[in-house]
Amino acid sequence: MPKPDTLKELLHRFTYHKPHPNSIPVFDGIRAYGKDFAVFVFEKVPDGCERSLAFAKIEEAVMWANAAVARNQAESESTAPGFETTEPEKTEGD
């Protein structure tokens, strides 16, 4: 993790960041992808210390990804970054 350049930056890391309602689907998506990957590892990777470490790193990746969203969301966001909501294109027969 890069060192903070300012005291403000350091304090921001240790401040509670209430989720913006539009960020909740991002948190859910991150956890869902992490869970899917963890299940894949559970089913396909032999049991042992390496698999245990893989689970720990998946948990860590989910945690840091969620922290990145929480720490960088803007209170005025209308949509969470990377998860813009658009209506699916209609095709004939829909």
Image: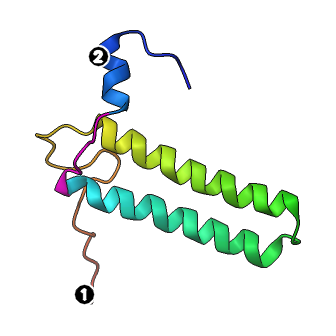
**Residue closest to the far left:** 76
Q: Secondary structure at mark 1?
A: loop
Per the rendered image, the range of residues in magenta is 15-21
- In the rendered image, the quadrant that contains the N terminus is top right
Residue 23, image x, y percentages: 26, 53
Name the residue: 30% across, 44% down.
Answer: 81
Is 28 contained in the magenta span? no
The quarter holding residue 36 reads bottom right
The front one of 12 and 72 is 12
Expressed as whole percent of the image width and height from the top left, the position of residue 26 reads 35, 56
In the image: residue 81, left or right of residue 30 = left
Foreground pick, 20 / 86:
20
Residue 83 versus residue 44 in the image, above or below: above
Label 2 sits on what residue type?
Lys
Q: Residue at x 42, y 49 (%)?
A: 66
Which badge, 1 or 2, comes first in the chain's sequence?
A: 2
Disc number for residue 46? none
Which residue carries the number 2 mark? 8
Q: Residue at x 84, y 70 (%)?
A: 45
Residue that extends furthest to the top in the rendered view of this protein: 5
Quickly name the residue at label 1: 94
Q: Nearer the viewer, residue 54 or 79?
A: 54
Q: Pointer 2: residues within 10 angstroms few (<14), some, or many (20+)?
A: few
